[in-house]
Amino acid sequence: MRAMDIQIPQRAQYSDSVRRDELEIARKFTHAVQKEMGKFVKGVILFGSSARHTSTPNSDIDMLVLIDDLSTYITRDVADAYRIVIQRLINQNSRRLHVVTLRLTAFWDYIRNGDPIGINMLRDGISMWDSGFFEPLQLLLKKGRIRPTDESIWAYYLKAPTTLKNAKWHVMQGVVDLYWAVIDAAHAALMSQNAVPPTPEHVADMLDEVLVNKGLLEREYSKIMRNMYERAKMILHYELHEVRGIDFDHYLEDANRFVERMKVFIGERPK
């Protein structure tokens, strides 16, 4: 009896739509990594904009290298030697290469917990070489078999309040930076009149005494200086806990006007 012919469809090659130059760089780098490191490397994956088909001629070529920390004890010396080799291979192939290295157990932990970083690598990644670890996980993800754990969901959520707090802190720190810009410009203007710059709390008064009262500067600028000092002091003494965006824009506008006016004033002084 004649054996039945079975047609086995092949999976599509995801690399078909990758830019040829990037694919060639990725292949050469992968071959070099395999040649240099052998079984220590368990997978080399192309990910990022190259894999998502959104790259430009100047984009980084993101490569994920999975290293074996199961059969190899990765000491500091091993890690240092690995970094030296990877940097040499980058220099030999393309400076566009951006290499991310993960231990096999760390990558597995990312996937097990449904971590967005690992999931994005798995979703978009194109396997340039795989020892049989990456592609099965990729298929499970495509089938909807990989789900985030409750622990990972809450771990990511709990980052959000801290990030919001950091954002508010950066806005307040921005006000302090504006204050120092105004202080530096005021000091320069006073120095141009041979006045010794005073401590910050007295700068506004000295602007009035040396410049405003002599008709050399408009009073609004000493008011800006005084207001910026008061706001910065309140922030540094934890008396002010939040700055609204509309208020920051106002402080930024004042600081820009102040700095520009001091520039004009210094430029107008007799030589």
Image (spheres, rainbow, N blue to C red):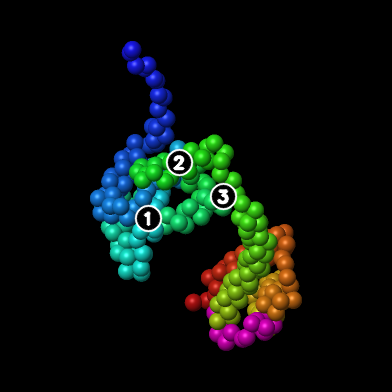
In this rendering, does residue 255 appear at all? Answer: no
Specify whether residue 149 is painted magenta.
no
In this rendering, does residue 16 appear at all? Answer: yes
x and y percentages locating residue 190 in the rendered image:
59, 80
When the figure is inspected, residue 156 is found, relative to residue 237, above or below; the finding is above
Q: Work out how far the residue at label 3 is from the one at label 2, CA to CA, in angstroms.
A: 15 Å
Q: Foreground: 96 or 161?
A: 161
Q: Work out how far the residue at label 3 is from the one at label 1, CA to CA, in angstroms.
A: 20 Å
x and y percentages locating residue 267 in the rendered image:
53, 70
Q: Amino acid at mark 1?
A: Ile
Q: Which residues are magenta?
A: 192-206
Is 187 situated left or right of 11 in this image? right
User: Circle 1 sits on which residue?
Assistant: 67
Specify whether residue 197 is painted magenta.
yes
User: Circle 3 sits on which residue?
Assistant: 114
Q: Foreground: 24 or 170?
A: 24
Say which residue appears at 55% left-offset and 73% top-offset. 266
Which quadrant of the figure has residue 71?
bottom left
Say which residue appears at 66% left-offset and 60% top-offset. 158
Where disc 1 sits, the SS reads: strand
First in sequence, mark 2 or 1: give its number. 1
Is 68 situated left or right of 269 in this image? left
Q: Foreground: 176 or 199?
A: 176
Where disc 3 sits, the SS reads: loop
The numbered mark at residue 136 is: 2
Say which residue appears at 34% left-offset and 16% top-offset. 3
When the figure is inspected, residue 230 is found, relative to residue 87, above or below; the finding is below
